[in-house]
Image (cartoon, grey):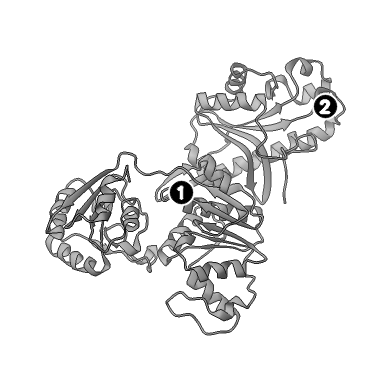
Amino acid sequence: MKNSLISSIFKRSKTLLAPDSLPIKALKQVAKEQNFLLFKDISLYLNNNQFFIPLIILDPMRGLYIFQKEESSYMELQKKDIQEVESKTVILFSQLQQHIKEKLHKNLSYKNFPIYHILLMENFNIEQYQHSNEAFQKLFSQENIIFSNSTTTEILEKLNNALEKTTLPNQIDIVANLIPYCVIYNDTTASFATEQQLMFITAAIKKNQTLQAPPKSGKTASLILKALYYKLQNPNDRVILLQKTPFEVSLAKQFMQKHNIKVDVLTPNELLHSHLLFTKQTTLSTKLSVEKSLMKKRFDIAEVVLCDDAQHHQKDFLEYLHHIQAKGKLVLINSDYNTQENFNFEEDFYAKELEVKLIQTQTPQEELLKLLEELLKEYEASDIVIFSSSAKRKELYVKLKKRLKICATLFNTKLTLNEQDIQNLLFMSYEDITNLNNKVSLFIADEANEYEQLQKALSVATTKNYLFFKEETLNILKIKNRKRV
């Protein structure tokens, strides 16, 4: 059931691009100065109910302030039925408040979470309020209202007087339980979505969408959250998220489990296999290919299909996705296809001071093992990943096992998260690069490495990179001359 905190007098703005009103600008300034979290035009999904909130502020020392917006003028408000206003604001807010308290008590073991209800009067000043009818003043006291002419000092004073300081759960945990699509999980850490990320996540999917985003921009996490957000809005629709390898599928599923929302995560082969079974044809080989017959058959597998890293897929597979979603919706990350709706992430989250050391030597393997011995005095084995070509990887792995006698894993993207121990030192090939946020990366590069491969591999570490090479190739020179990883 969809409940809105916006009644006929609490109307949602018709466009998200409308400029902020003066009281909202003042509230944003207060939130910035006090390090409060502010969320504008947010939907909460609680106990199968959807609540649209124009503005939420979280004071990590006091609690939640939930704002309802009033856009009527003084004369319009005087004509309102006060009982209707009460039923569509105060009573509905009480329901929302109870849902929030129950969820935070259940998930965070915090009883009676402090929440304050505030009316935001965008076209109504304090002088007009003092001349409004008595019934309205009784329903909303002056202390429960932010007026069109409220100053930042007055706003802060009202917020501080409304709730007392107390000890609350971590603010990310609070938001993750109430607004899950605003929180991005990365391994064991979490952060809030940026403005660009949130714009992409919450944008309605009218037909086809494309996101252009660099590595380390949170594109995969944002795509997962977009799938979750769509599912929250449309619980009866089937949503499919495509990840290139079984390992990436398992990572996405782990992310999904934090939210307990059903989204199907598949590899391209699994999608094609499902279509072949649907048409009662033979199953696929391990090599990804699109049977010609599948381009002639309808396959209404899902209302929405979201595909990560489209640039790494074959052209015929992308054409196949457009074919099966001819009547559905399709979201592609880094696709060359022109779509009506395009989004861009301009910011990336590379370690700004990442150390990159290039080491030229005629014995790369030997020098790497020597350095590794030193690094293991400072770092855990699980903090380190070693890159080499597929042909040389096992040879280096055997040498390391004999020499250092530590637990190591030959990483394989065809295996899931549970099928290999990534808490060991990892041996990764350039073909199997994935971002696991290891602190240190060691590389053996040769003339076969493409510059893009090296660049992508150099983005895995969060602290240090050591690149060993024999000959100073053009690609090594490019790495030397680039501004930063």
Tell me, for residue 250, which label it has, or none: none
Please state the horizontal and vertical placement of residue 76, each as a whole percent of the image. 84, 27
Question: In the rendered structure, which amino acid carries the disc numbered 2?
Answer: Leu
Q: Is residue 220 above or below residue 317?
A: above
- Relative to the observer, which residue lies in front, 373 or 114? 373
Determine the residue positioned at 60% across, 23% down.
Answer: 159
Please state the horizontal and vertical placement of residue 65, each as a whole percent of the image. 61, 31
- Tell me where residue 262 sits by quadrant: bottom right
Can I make out residue 108 in this image? yes
Residue behind mark 1: 218
Determine the residue positioned at 61% across, 54% down.
Answer: 230
Residue behind mark 2: 77
Label count reads 2
Q: Earlier in the sequence, mark 2 or mark 1?
A: 2
- Which of discs 2 and 1 lies nearer the camera? The answer is 1
Residue positioned most to the front: 474
Decide: few, some or many residues near mark 1? Use Cα within 10 Å; few <14, some 14-19, many ≥20.
many
Q: Secondary structure at mark 1?
A: loop
Please state the horizontal and vertical placement of residue 436, each as a whole percent of the image. 35, 54
Q: How far, Cα to Cα, is label 2 from label 1?
A: 45 Å
- Relative to the observer, which residue lies in front, 383 or 243? 243
- Tell me where residue 29 sits by quadrant: top right
